[in-house]
Amino acid sequence: MKRTQPRAAGAAALCATLLAGCPEGGRDAVPPPEVLHGAASAGALAARAGSPGTSPGNDPALGREGARFEDVTAEAGITFRHVNGATGQKFILETLGSGVCVFDYDGDDLQDIYFVQSGRLPGYTPQAPLRSALYRNLGHGRFEDVTARAGVGGPDRYGFGCTAGDVDGDGDRDLYVTYYGTSLLYRNNGDGTFTDVSETSGARNTLWGTSAAFADADGDGDLDLYVANYVAFDEANNLYCGENRPGYRTVCHPRNFDPQPDVLYRNRGDGTFEDVSAAAGIVDRTGKGLGVVWGDYDGDGDQDIYVANDDTPNFLWRNSGNGTFDDVASLVGVALSEDGVPQAGMGTDMADYDNDGRLDIFVTNLSQETNELYHNDGNGLFSDRTFVSGLGAPSLLDLGFGTFFFDCDNDGDLDLFVANGHIIDNISLYSDTITFEQRPGMYRNIGGGRFERLTYPAEAPFGRRYVGRGAVPFDYDDDGDEDIVLTQNDGPALVLRNTLVRSPHWVTITLAGTAPNRDAIGALVTLQAGGARLVRYARTASSYLSQAERRLHFGLGSAAAIDNVVVRWPGRRGFAEEFTGVPVDHFVTLQQGKGRRLPSAPNRSGR
């Protein structure tokens, strides 16, 4: 995340400790923060977009109103409100917001919601205890708060992200929550309650944890854990940044803080973990991690890791298959912008947006940068398709966080959602074009590898402005189209219902693997229907500090029948099975070992 360059409070000694120092001429010589982020590069981006003086969001060529959503938060019974504890001291902690995890915690096949709470900062006194919140899905679009009953309200610490997965192979999903400080692991007891097993789990990350995600890193069937860490920050030594006059203080740029190493925890097979970061090669590089997603980008059967880093090059940890990883992000073209500079990586997703069978990568960034789309070219390399896809220009004034590919209109193409919102609450003092609250970005896939940004009336949910952070899709009402849950920094969470009236065909697939990876995390599912080949990847967390439901949704357009579904099951002994006779417009479970086993094929990577 990029922010205003540091300003001294007036002392020359303090100036020397800050990244940019104090320019000659004192405080009045400091330019506005957005200028310091690189006005020249922003101008070049605008020129590349075609109209340097036109706000991309107002360009009528960017699209029309597409799939419609309605705010059903109140009627769903969701009352969670995030609190960042801000008191005007501009702690960097208060800017990140928190995430949301959607998972079936009680095994009733309904998707429940867990919101992470942040909390108090020095000088802030909450009106009531600050707790994370678990909402149980009652069906028919209604939820109830079961936080106290389940025992997952969390400690009085500053929380950020979450991920859920069955770490002990007992058939129910456990919950991991990251904090500024020690993270927590809740073991699911199978009776609607959880037990905090952090002390004995071996996964007590004590750094500033942000996004985390479970996956089988070593192919032994157990879910391992990757935790992204951000920066070394001490709230007792909070720097003063911004102009030294009333109301102009801003949060400090992350360049003022040292990066922290990420952590890889190996599952010992009993639900406890050991830190294998050094042996795996993860500690060899440090970044300022905010977004994490697992995915087999090179098709070799191993799960690789992509990390969106803030103001440092992004990581792509290629799984070597022997317990070690190599960061190949710079080598394959997904570390930097098209101009070759690090950006403010926030959220990320990995999906096949152009239906060529390969997983592509999307990253959200700061305003006056652009979000980035990296196309998987199939030869181990990626190409930057940000502008040719139509995703570049519309994102110039946005600051993106949570993001995901999903088929919002069930036409068979993956569309794209971005939760936007700035991190500088007084940005209006520095810019007349960039706002603190921002409209979400809804991008419709129009085929041919291109997107159009949809426009909505001011009264519609996507016509309003938010301070968006975590966001994931899920079909909360089980009607066959994908809805959205969104968190705001220091604001209420939102549940947005997809209101497709005459929906094209669809199918939603749940994978039933074998113990210990019963949820088949890491499986690759390929569906063929109506001449199209659609790919989905079973994973846990993605987006920003968040996790979507594990069910895999396929929009089928006008295809009234599915030709077949092929599942490449995860693990060292993973194999492919073909399933036929899968019905459209249904929720379907595919069980490992019940399909027609296909002959083994060489992996695409050549290894």
Image (cartoon, rainbow, N blue to C red):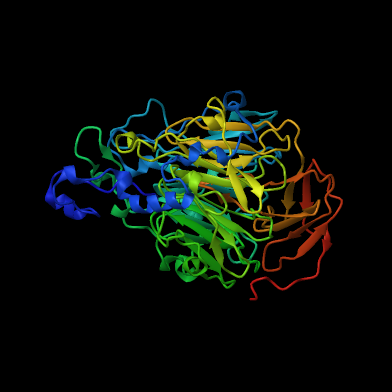
Quadrant in which the C terminus is drawn:
bottom right
Query: Which is nearer the eye, 438 or 275?
Result: 438
Furthest toward the bottom, the residue is 607
Task: Check the image and report above or below for 582 versus 332.
Answer: above
Query: Which is nearer the eye, 54 or 187?
Result: 54
Residue 192 appearing in the image: no
How far across and down, in percent of the image, does residue 596 sit? 84, 61
- Does residue 139 appear left or right of residue 488 in this picture? right
Residue drawn at point x = 49 percent, y = 35 percent: 439
Name the quadrant containing residue 134.
top right
Residue drawn at point x = 45 percent, y = 33 percent: 82
How far across and down, in percent of the image, does residue 366 sit? 42, 47
How far across and down, in percent of the image, does residue 1 sit? 39, 49
Query: Which is nearer the eye, 168 or 24?
Result: 24
Task: Check the image and report above or below for 160 versus 263.
Answer: above
- Does residue 128 appear left or right of residue 357 in this picture? left
Task: Check the image and report above or below for 461 versus 380.
Answer: above
Query: Which is nearer the eye, 58 or 32?
Result: 58
Figure disc tally? 0
- Does residue 16 appear left or right of residue 517 in this picture? left
Residue 303 appearing in the image: yes
Name the quadrant containing residue 319.
bottom right
Task: Check the image and report above or below for 204 versus 587.
Answer: below
How far across and down, in percent of the image, does residue 539 sit? 62, 53
- Does residue 459 appear left or right of residue 89 in this picture? right
